[in-house]
Amino acid sequence: KAGVTQTPRYLIKTRGQQVTLSCSPISGHRSVSWYQQTPGQGLQFLFEYFSETQRNKGNFPGRFSGRQFSNSRSEMNVSTLELGDSALYLCASTWTGTNTEAFFGQGTRLTVV
Amino acid sequence: DAKTTQPNSMESNEEEPVHLPCNHSTISGTDYIHWYRQLPSQGPEYVIHGLTSNVNNRMASLAIAEDRKSSTLILHRATLRDAAVYYCILRGPPGGSSNTGKLIFGQGTTLQVKP
């Protein structure tokens, strides 16, 4: 069974630009969550999508948004990039039935210059 | 969200057992205790979870205190591949209204394994 796939793996953007990251969950999983990981703040929850609806949201500014498609694939978008947005962005998929194990992708490393 | 407290770092020798502690004094009666670990340059991976009884799987054992205010992840024979950051996380029960994909990570324990 294929794991969680995140694309691209690496990205370099300039301040002020916007970026879109993609996450393909494990087949059959309906929940996709996004996390930001930085050396200073650790792993922080961004938001979760389930059945195309945002179910949870972390404490991030409105520049961070996401969406989920009918095939459960998810995208997150960051607009007006700032240097502080440089981070590893991870997504995790969960079936959200009785199985509570979350499966993570390898992440997208975003560098803002 | 209930909070967990873990030591920042621990060291172990290869092939020796490792006991990674976690305190969760504000745990609710329905919270499950989950452990994840993050190997260098990878996303976190699930290790084990439990509610009240001790749990074993191929990766590790989880020992839960009788009052559930603390737990210990046990790696029976540490290998160099076990060097990682270990996270202890509390989650709501399966199927419950709080059972979502959201995980609240603390700082975790960085485990160093020496040859």
Image: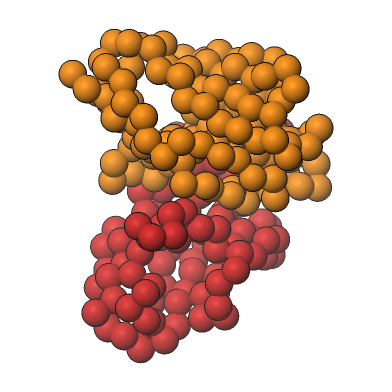
Chain colours: A red, B orange
Q: Quadrant of the N terminus of chain A?
A: top left
User: Going 55% across and 72% down the picture, which residue do you hit?
Assistant: A60
User: Going 27% across and 83% down the picture, which residue do you hit?
Assistant: A14
Q: Nearer the viewer, residue B2 or A105?
A: B2
Task: Mark yes or no: residue A85 visible.
Answer: yes
User: Going 61% across and 64% down the picture, which residue do you hit?
Assistant: A58
Residue A89: x percent and y percent? 41, 60
Q: Left or right of A40: which side holds A12?
A: left
Q: Quadrant of the C terminus of chain A?
A: bottom left
User: Going 41% across and 40% down the picture, which residue do you hit?
Assistant: B8
Relative to A61, is B98 above or below? above
In the current view of this chain or complex, which residue is farthest to the left?
B115
Residue A26: x percent and y percent? 50, 44
Q: Quadrant of residue A3?
A: top left
Q: Nearer the viewer, residue B47 or B20?
A: B20
Q: Nearer the viewer, residue A29 or A45?
A: A45
Residue B38: x percent and y percent? 39, 39
